[in-house]
Image (cartoon, helix red, strand yellow):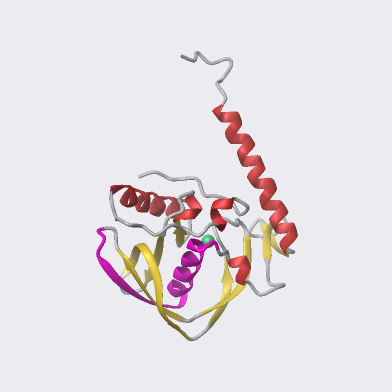
Amino acid sequence: MAVRKILICGDPVLRRKAERVREVDDWIRQLLDDMVETMREAPGIGLAAPQVGESVRCIVALEHTEDKGEKVYKLVNPRVRGRGGEQTGYEGCLSLPTLHGEVTRPEWVVVSAQDESGQHVKVEATGLLARCLLHEIDHLDGVLFVDRAEPGSLKWAVPDEREEDGFRWEPAPLEEVMAAFERLRRRQAEQEAKSAEPDPAGEGP
Ligand code: ZN
């Protein structure tokens, strides 16, 4: 397993409609395992394949329950078959670091998918898991939570030493947020280009 790089908002892969998986093979199983490791390391409770640069219909999610402990979902070609009710709450995304926004979604969903062995499975979810699955399935269609967030509810964490948690929440106008992520993406690309250059002082082949 390997931790993969998480793409930041602004990367075109995040806006592409992901391809259906024709066969659940070793490549897909490896991808799902890597996604789980990447999600845990982040840490997050869900991740979609486009977020690690693979435009295929795979998602992973984590559920914590009092009685059953932790459950990991690895879903291939997930589809929402039923939904109902309504819940409103704050959401974030590993591809939009530090940003939160209020999103209204169905309270429960029924999702059909294939598991990592290609078997057809049905997941019935409520509350946070339902929200998480819908958020990840949105990623497969190039939809980000900011597209659904209540206008004016976006806020982001700004470092602030005076605060107990080391940051404070500030309202985040969408254009400002997008420009900030673009700068972050550019910085990351520059750093990657630099670390890919051969070290002039190194012994080199
Ligand atoms: Zn997300």
**Residue 31: percent from left, percent from top:** 37, 50
Left or right of 64? Residue 10 is: right
Eyeballing the image, is 65 above or below 203? below
**Residue 74: percent from left, percent from top:** 35, 61
Foreground pick, 67 / 28: 28
Eyeballing the image, is 140 above or below 10? below
Left or right of 173? Residue 6 is: left
Eyeballing the image, is 70 above or below 24? below
- The residue at 47%/71% (across/down) is 134
- The residue at 54%/61% (across/down) is 142
Q: How many marks?
A: 0
> For residue 128: magenta?
yes
Foreground pick, 5 / 21: 21
**Residue 190: percent from left, percent from top:** 64, 35
- Can you say which quadrant of the picture contains the N terminus? top left
Magenta residues span 117-142
Eyeballing the image, is 125 above or below 18? below
Left or right of 1? Residue 174 is: right
- The residue at 70%/73% (across/down) is 151
Q: Is residue 159 visible?
A: no
Q: Is residue 192 visible?
A: yes
Quadrant position of residue 89: bottom right
**Residue 70: percent from left, percent from top:** 34, 65
- The residue at 36%/57% (across/down) is 21
> For residue 10: magenta?
no
